[in-house]
Image (cartoon, rainbow, N blue to C red):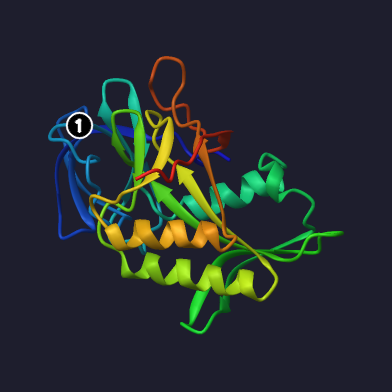
C-alpha cells in the first residue's frame, strides 16, 4: 500500500490541542494540519522537524492537510498517523507477508468481543486447521537508540486489550498482539516499563497465557532516507520481553 498522492513537505512549528499542528511549507506559507494521533507522540515532534503532509481536496473538510510522517533524526522517519496501522497490518496479512497468520480466508475489522466490551482490530477466520485469530494492532513510534517501546503513555485501554486477548486464548482461539513498527530506526520492540509498568507486566502475563506477539516494520523511506511513499510492512523485527 502507498499514500494515494505525493506528500507535501514542510517544517513543524508546533503541535497543540492534540489534533492540530502548524507547519511551514517550502514557500513560507504556514498551514494548520490535522494531527491524527491521540497519544503523547513522545520523540516524534522535534522542534523544526521535517514533516510530510497528505492533502485533501474535499471541500467539506475543515483542514486540507493531514500530518503523516516526521523525520525524528537525520534520515530516520516515523509515521504518526494512527489511522494507518490497521490497514497496514491487514494488507500484510492478506499479501502473505506475515507467515504466522497465513492461510485464513476471511478478515473482518472492528468486531465486538469480550466481557469488557471491546472491538478487535482484525478477526481472521476460515483456516483449514487453525482456530480463529483475534488480532490487536498497535502503532510503535517511540524509539530510544535502536529500541522501540510501547506504549508512549500510560494506557488503560491497552491494558484492557491484553486482558481481552488472554480471555480469547482461554476460549480456545488464537490471540495476537501485532506491533506495526512505523519507525525506520527501530530494530527491536520492547514493553515500555519505564512509562507504563502495569502494561509491561500484563504483556508478559499475556505471553505466558498463550497470546502471540509479533512486530513488523514499515518501509516508509527510500535509500536516501526520504519518504518512499510506501506504507507496506516489509520485515519482521524481534520482540523482547526482558525487563
Name the residue located 63 percent from the left edge and 47 percent from the top edge.
Answer: 91
Nearer the observer, 234 or 193: 193
* Residue nearest the viewer, comparing 8 with 81: 81
- Residue 233, percent from left and from top: 56, 38
Q: Nearer the viewer, residue 113 or 80?
A: 113
Foreground of the two, 234 or 13: 234
**Vertical position of residue 228 compared to residue 216: above or below:** above
Q: Which residue is label 1 attached to?
A: 49
Q: Is residue 38 visible?
A: no
Residue 131 versus residue 86 in the image, above or below: below
Q: Is residue 117 left or right of residue 144?
A: right
Quarter of the image holding residue 51? Answer: top left
Image coords of residue 95 (percent x, y): 71, 42
Residue visible at 56% across and 37% down in the picture: 232
Q: How many marks?
A: 1
- Quadrant of the image occupied by residue 128: bottom right
| 174 w.r.t. 16: above or below | below
The C terminus lies in which quarter of the figure? top left
Looking at the picture, how far across and down is residue 5, in whole percent? 47, 38
**What is the x, y in percent for residue 194?**
23, 50
Which residue is at the far top? 224
Amino acid at each position: 500500500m502507498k499514500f494515494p498522492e505525493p506528500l507535501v513537505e514542510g517544517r513543524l512549528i508546533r503541535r497543540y490541542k492534540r489534533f492540530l499542528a502548524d507547519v511551514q511549507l517550502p514557500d513560507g506559507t504556514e498551514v494548520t494540519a490535522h494531527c491524527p494521533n491521540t497519544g503523547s507522540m513522545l520523540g516524534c515532534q522535534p522542534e523544526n522537524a521535517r514533516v510530510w503532509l497528505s492533502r485533501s481536496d474535499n471541500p467539506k473538510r475543515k483542514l486540507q492537510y493531514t500530518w503523516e510522517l516526521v523525520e525524528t533524526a537525520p534520515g530516520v522517519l516515523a509515521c504518526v498517523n494512527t489511522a494507518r496501522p490497521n490497514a497496514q497490518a491487514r494488507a500484510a496479512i492478506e499479501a502473505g507477508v506475515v507467515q504466522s497468520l497465513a492461510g485464513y480466508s476471511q478478515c473482518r475489522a472492528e468486531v465486538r468481543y469480550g466481557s469488557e466490551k471491546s472491538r478487535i482490530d482484525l478477526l481472521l477466520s476460515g483456516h483449514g486447521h487453525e482456530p480463529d485469530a483475534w488480532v490487536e494492532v498497535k502503532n510503535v513510534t517511540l524509539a530510544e537508540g535502536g529500541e522501540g517501546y510501547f506504549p508512549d503513555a500510560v494506557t488503560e485501554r491497552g491494558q484492557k486489550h491484553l486482558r481481552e486477548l488472554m480471555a480469547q486464548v482461554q476460549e480456545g482461539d488464537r490471540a495476537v498482539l501485532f506491533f506495526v513498527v512505523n519507525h525506520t530506526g527501530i530494530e527491536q520492540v520492547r514493553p515500555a516499563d519505564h512509562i507504563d509498568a502495569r502494561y509491561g507486566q500484563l504483556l508478559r502475563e499475556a505471553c505466558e497465557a498463550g497470546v502471540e506477539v509479533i512486530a513488523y516494520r514499515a518501509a516508509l523511506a527510500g535509500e536516501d532516507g526520504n519518504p518512499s511513499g510506501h506504507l507496506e510492512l516489509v520485515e519482521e523485527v524481534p520482540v523482547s520481553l526482558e525487563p
